[in-house]
Amino acid sequence: HSGEAWWTRAVVYQVYPRSFMDSNGDGIGDLGGILQRLDHLADLGVDVLWLSPVYPSPQADNGYDISDYQDIDPLFGSLAQLDELIAALHARGMKLLMDLVVNHTSDAHPWFVESRSSKDSPKRDWYWWRPPRPGMAAGDPGAEPTNWQSFFSGPVWQLDEASGEYYLHLFDRRQPDLNWENPQVRHAVYEMMRWWLDRGVDGFRMDVINMISKDVAPDGSLRDGPPLPGSSLGSGFGSFLCGPRIHEFLQEMHREVFAGRNGAFLTVGEMPGVTVEQARLFTDPARAEVDMVFQFEHVGLDHGTSKWDVHPLRMRDLKASFGRWQAGLADVGWNSLYWDNHDQPRAVSRFGDDSPEFRRDSATCLATLLHLHRGTPYVYQGQELGMANYPFRSLEEFADVESLNHSVQAVSAGAHADEVLAALRTMSRDNARTPVQWDASPHAGFTTGTPWLAVNPDHVEWNADAQRTDPSSVLAHYRRLHALRHELPVVAMGDFGMLLAEHEHVYAFTRSLDGVTLLVVCNLSRTPYGLATLLPEAIGADLVLGNLPDAGDELRPWEARVLRL
Ligand code: ISL
Ligand code: CA
C-alpha cells in the first residue's frame, strides 16, 4: 500500500519553461522568469514544481531533444540559476522535479555523434542501428528494417547515407532512441540521475519511460508489428510499449539511483498506452519501480484512427475510464491525475465549455472533479487561470514539430488544408504552449520582446492579475482545492466510490476515510438537474466547497459541489 507517502497530499505544478515567463526580453521563457514568479506558485499552494527540459538542446522538440544531460541551455539560463531555483523552492517548502528524457537523445548529443561516426565506434551499439530489410537496398521504398510508425508521422527509421544503415527514432528523426539493452547506456543514465540528486533535485518526471525496452528477437533483430486492434496507435507499438525488460530496467534504476538515499523523492513515469494492470505493477511500492505513472486513456477518448481524427467525447466514457483506474489502483499503487500538459489541448476547451458564458464555471467544475479523485493532481501552467485553446487561423501559425510533421504528411497524402487546419486547431500541442497570461498588457506580461509563440488575444480578460484578488476566479478556486487537500486526509487517502455510472452528464462519487464521507457532484453539461431525485443524500448535506454561490436543490450547468455527508 502507498500508505501515507508525502506525495499523496501534494499538488504538482508543471512549468513549460519556454512559455512561462521571459526575464531577458528575447521572447522565450527562462529560469530567471521562473524565479520572478515563485510567489504565484506559493500563493497557489502547490508543493512540487515539475520543470520541463531546460538542458542544452537544438530545440527540435522544444528541449525534449537533449544534447547534454548535465548542463542548462543558455536559452534558459545557467546551472547557477538552476541551483538558485532549487534553493528558492526549498526555502518555500516546495520541491523540484526534473524532466528525465532518456528514451532518446538529440542527434546532436556527443553520444550519437560518436555512434554515427562509424560502424566500429565503441558507441555504435548505444543506439539502434540496423541494415535495410533483407534483399533490399538502403533507401528503397519499404527498405526500412521494420514497419513501425513514428509518433511524429512517417517511419521510425532514418537512413544514414554514410554507413548505409538506419537508426531508430520513435519520435522525430532528430531524436534517436538509446539502446537500453546496452548496460553502458543504462549506467551512464543512472550516473547522470545521481548527479542531479546530489545537486538537490527531488525527483524526476520520466519521459516515455515505458518505451525504453524494445521487443528484441533472440537473434537480436527487431520485427514487424501488427497494427494494434482497437487502438489509434500505429504498427509496431506493441513492440516497444512496456517491452519485455521494462520492469527489470526500472527496478535496476531504482536500485542504482534511489535505494539507500535519504530524502523524500518523487518519480512519475510518463507511459503512453499503459494499461491499468501494468500500472499496478509499475506503482506497487513493494516492487520499487516508480511512485506513479501518467496514463493516457482519458486523453485518447476523443481520438479516432489517430489523434488528428477528432471524435466528440462522451462523458460516460470518461467516467468509465476514470472509474476503472480508480478501482484498479485502489489497494495497490497510486494514480496521477491530470487534464492538461504541454502535449494536450487545453482542458477547458476540450472537456469543458469555453464559451464566455460557461468558461469559468466549466474550468472550476473540471478542476473540482479531477482534484477530488484519489491520486496526485498535476496542474499545468495556465490551467489555474482557465487558459483556453488558441484561435489558430492558418497552418503557418503552428510551431510544434508534431503538428508540422503531421501537416506536411497529411497535405502530401492529399488531405485538404482546411481539414488539416481543423484538426490542428482542436488537437495541436501548440494550444498548450502559448505564453502564460500574467496580465492584460500587450504580451500578457510574459515578455518585453516578441513572444516565440503568439499570446492568446483573450489575455486581456483572462489573466493572473485580474484573478488574483477575485474570490470567484478560477485561480481562487484552485487555491481552495489545494488548501482542501492539505487540510482533509479524506481528500488524499479516502476510498473512491463511483455513483450514477450510467448518467451522461452528472459525474458523482464518494470519498471515505475513517468515518468521514465526502460526496462530490459535478454537472458536466449546460442542462440543470434536480438533485432531489438524482442524489437525495445531497440535499441538506454540508457544503465543503462549491464553484457557484448559493447552492440549492438544483445542480446548475457546470456546477460542482463537494459535500460532507
Ligand atoms: O503529444 C502526444 C500526442 O500525440 C504524444 O504522443 C506524446 O508525444 C507522447 O505523449 C510523448 O510525450 C513526451 O515525449 C515526446 C515529447 O515530444 C513530448 O513533449 C513529451 O511529453 C518526445 O520526447
Ligand atoms: Ca528569455
Image: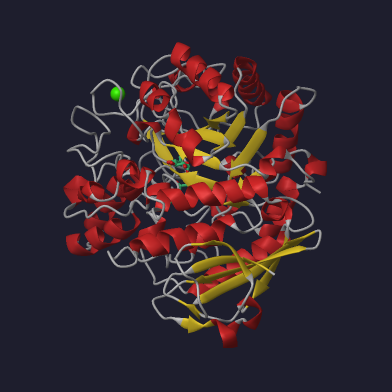
How many marks on residues? Answer: 0
**Residue 151 visible here:** no
The chosen color scheme is: secondary structure
Based on the displayed image, in which of its 4 quarters is residue 517 positioned? Answer: bottom right
Q: Is residue 447 visible?
A: yes
**Residue found 53% across the figure and 46% down from its top:** 378
Q: Quadrant of the C terminus?
A: bottom right
Q: Residue drawn 54% across and 25% down?
A: 89
Residue 502 image position (x, y, % from top left): 58, 81
To which quarter of the image does residue 422 belong? bottom left
Left/right placement of residue 32 relative to residue 191 reads left
Q: Residue at x 31, y 51 (%)?
A: 406
Ligand 1 located in image quadrant: top left
Task: Return the residue nearer the eye: 535 or 210.
Answer: 535
Residue 99 located left or right of residue 356:
right
Please say if 326 is above or below 536: above
Q: Nearer the viewer, residue 530 or 149?
A: 530
Which residue extends farthest top?
A: 80
Q: Does residue 305 sit above or below 404 in this rendering?
A: below
Q: Residue at x 48, y 66 (%)?
A: 301
Closest to the observer, 71 or 435: 435
Residue 564 location (% of width, % of height): 66, 66
Q: Position of residue 286 (x, y in %)?
A: 83, 42
The answer to whether 255 appears left or right of 529 in the picture is right
Residue 484, horizontal then vertical, whole percent: 60, 51
Q: Against 346, is 129 above or below?
A: above
